[in-house]
Image (spheres, rainbow, N blue to C red):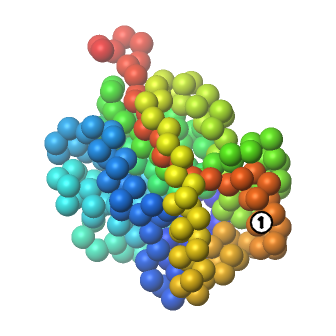
Amino acid sequence: MSGCSASAYWSGTLPSGEVLSHPGGSALTRRALELACLPAGARVLDVGCGSGQSLRLLGSLGYCGLGVDLASDGRPGVSYIRARAEALPVPSASFEAVLMECSLSVAAAQQQAILECARVLVPGGRLIVSDLYARAPESIRQIRALERSCVAGMLVREDLECWLGRAGFRTNLWEDHSSELRTFVAGFLMQGGTPDELWGCSGGSAEAIAQAMRSVRAGYFLLVATRGPERGEQR
């Protein structure tokens, strides 16, 4: 994933060390899992698992979750491995679902991360993504210029759906949850955090990031996609 480890959005912690949930929190994760219609006991890979909140939710719902993250600190009560989204050290066709919450946009190679998700999913497996996106993509250059901020990799819907199609995915659902992003940011600031801490502003001022995010009308989305069969695989 990208070099924005100082960002609270990426690391999932407040300056005090308190765990910070992603926009929408567990309620949005539950909705995503319901919409994905996973079988009982499904194997789910949580890529960018952070503190393990969603992994614990997966376990409580009867799913078999495994986390992937770059951080090496412990996550009590969950199973995880240290790895990058672009090189998942798990066998091909070994999961019914891959969950990526706030992690695709900070992957160092987003298209390769999607290809890896396709590789580890069984035919018909679900990819679940919730993340930042530009609702005014014509201004995305302002975001891309913020190379050392975790918002620099903000997604563009048209590009993402193109990459998914090339990787053999069919998009089943796209929902806008930008109101959850606004609530998330407000909550972080109310708990004593600053924009610098939230977005990882080592590559530019908080004012520059705020201006760029206004220009692209930064939003938050939920996507569910299905992996189709490879050539020669049975449908």
Instruction: Identify which residue, 126 or 147, lies in the foreground.
Output: 126
Q: Is residue 123 rendered to the left or right of residue 12?
A: left
Q: Position of residue 212 (x, y in %)?
A: 79, 59
**Image quarter of the C terminus:** top left
Instruction: Identify which residue, 177 or 88, lies in the foreground.
Output: 177
* Three-letter code for the amino acid on which mark 1 is drawn: Ile
Q: Dot 1, how many residues are within 10 Å of its Cα: few (below 14), some (14-19), or many (20+)? A: many
Q: Residue at (36%, 59%) from the top-left corner?
A: 27
Label 1 secondary element? helix
Is residue 61 shown above or below 163?
A: below
Q: Is residue 47 rendered to the left or right of residue 151?
A: left
Q: Position of residue 195 (x, y in %)?
A: 68, 76
Instruction: Identify which residue, 125 or 93, lies in the foreground.
Output: 125
Q: Which residue is mark 1?
A: 209
Q: Residue at (36%, 74%) from the top-left corner?
A: 74
Q: Is residue 207 rendered to the left or right of residue 20?
A: right
Find residue 203 and report its image quarter. Answer: bottom right
**Is any atom of residue 82 visible in this view?**
no
**Image quarter of the N terminus:** bottom right
Q: Residue at (44%, 69%) from the top-left corner?
A: 21
